[in-house]
Amino acid sequence: MTRLNPHISVDCVIFGFDGANLKVLLIEREKLPEENPDIPSDILKLPGNLISDTEDLDESAYRVLRELTGLDKIFLKQFSVFGNPNRLDNSNDLEWLRVTSELPVERVVTIAYYSLVKINESNPNESLLSRTKWIEANEIPKLIFDHNQIIDKALDALRKELRTEPIGFELLPKKFTLRQLQNLYEVILGNKLDNRNFRKKVGKLDYLVALPEKENGVNHKPAQLYKFDKKTFYKTRKDAGFVI
Amino acid sequence: MTRLNPHISVDCVIFGFDGANLKVLLIEREKLPEENPDIPSDILKLPGNLISDTEDLDESAYRVLRELTGLDKIFLKQFSVFGNPNRLDNSNDLEWLRVTSELPVERVVTIAYYSLVKINESNPNESLLSRTKWIEANEIPKLIFDHNQIIDKALDALRKELRTEPIGFELLPKKFTLRQLQNLYEVILGNKLDNRNFRKKVGKLDYLVALPEKENGVNHKPAQLYKFDKKTFYKTRKDAGFVI
DNA sequence: ATAGTTAGCGTATTTTTTACGCTAAGTTTG
DNA sequence: CAAACTTAGCGTAAAAAATACGCTAACTAT
């Protein structure tokens, strides 16, 4: 068994997009061996844990995600660190961490990641599923420790990254409609886009490939499906300018 | 005396711009109490140290910079974390850290910051000055531990941030010429810009204020001086678009 | 058959970017 | 003092991108 490092953890904000809303995957805090009314187990938290002493940080993050959610090989990006000496001050949260980790935890610095998953194509482990919940990003309840703050910062980082990198496709199914793509940008960046201008802009991109298929199961005119061609994107990418 | 945390450090890549080149401030490794030919003290490193147990991470970074370089109140941005379990494997570097910190250091995760300073207006502490060196960013020698890799990533982060945030001004004197600003963008982003188009673009920005002064001491036609008006910038800022 | 919804194509206008030509103001050199 | 040199600084023309709309077609539900 690898030893856990009681000073450093990873926490991960997992984003998903259901076609209309941005969601975050949260998990119920693990139950204690002995029930304790001061330490309820229905409070939610980010998937995260102490790192193991033999792993690099990214490896720890991948492992923790696998163990807690069943998700594997997903987009993961380190975006910040939270290390305020008082961040664990909520006494029942801290007690919970001490009991479950079986370590004399004092200060923990956590490396924060955000992750993007295809919400409909992901296969979370069934046995873990019951304890995980997709919650809308703007309806997050009070979480343990400073996890609310971590989500806020993750959202900032996601918005910023979405403006310059083609990461939106990580949140969409492999085959998606232009409407889905537009909704994604509208929801995450928070402003309406003109349907016709969006299609015009996006239609010129040679790394968005139209497929000989249409969506189905919708109660309106079915739209054409597209895929994102990563190779073409990186082959033809040119430097963006700068906006002082 | 505050206790040092032997598991977590901060390291800082300090960038400066002299009007023509991007530089990084490095320091000579501290001498050991007893000389040891295996552990030379003329090798360079990033300013950095273990954090103190009572400080938030940013505070640690500011303190360490003050102690090692005399720099105070400077632009500081956390951009990554380096925690590979083998990152301290160079045995003489590790031994040096153990002796100087007087702690049983094993694995250290380091929080990496980059910092932007006005190279001509900064007042490094004289007594520390002898052990610090401004080195051109593309001529960095082999440093201790993984500090070369940290600088590479800092450069990536700086370039990325420079495209969307007004951080270039942190590297220029308070009063600067448009030529200096243009050189800054050319050097950091690595491509030539057309003099006339650059001036046209920049001339339309109402947060770049022309001062009733010209530069002097140059052996050509002196240029007008400008300043960056931060308030106006943030007041009039509007969201940029997205580039898929 | 009709109403309702989204897909999808177009046009006109404004703004931004790109690619240059050229003169003016200062310094250095012979 | 004149000529050569360097950078500052103003301009124009064309291309590309962003913005603001009008309109029809295709499909579903009632």
Image (cartoon, coloured by chain):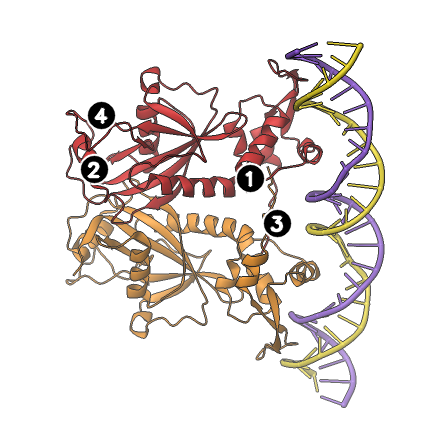
Chain colours: A red, B orange, C yellow, D purple
Which residue position holds label 4?
A: A31
Secondary structure state at the residue bearing disc 1: loop
- The residue under the point 41% across, 18% down is A123
Determine the chain carrying the residue at label 1.
A
Asked if labels 4 and 2 share a chain, the reply is yes
Tell me where residue A6 appears, x and y as whole percent: 20, 39
Label 3 close to label 4 by CB (< 8 Å):
no
Name the residue carrying label 2: A92
| Residue A104 visible | yes
Q: Are marks 4 and 2 in contact (CB under 8 Å)?
A: no
Mark 3 or mark 2: whose residue is earlier in sequence: 2
In the picture, measured across the screen, residue B97 lies left or right of residue A140, that is left
Which residue does the numbered mark 3 point to in the structure image?
Answer: A241
Q: Amino acid at mark 2?
A: Asn
Chain of residue at mark 4: A
Mark 3, Cα crowd under 10 Å, few <14 / some 14-19 / many 20+, is few
Q: Are marks 3 and 2 in contact (CB under 8 Å)?
A: no
Q: CA distance from mark 3 to mark 2?
A: 50 Å
At which x and y percent is residue A177? Answer: 62, 24
The amino acid type, in three-letter code, at marker 4 is: Lys
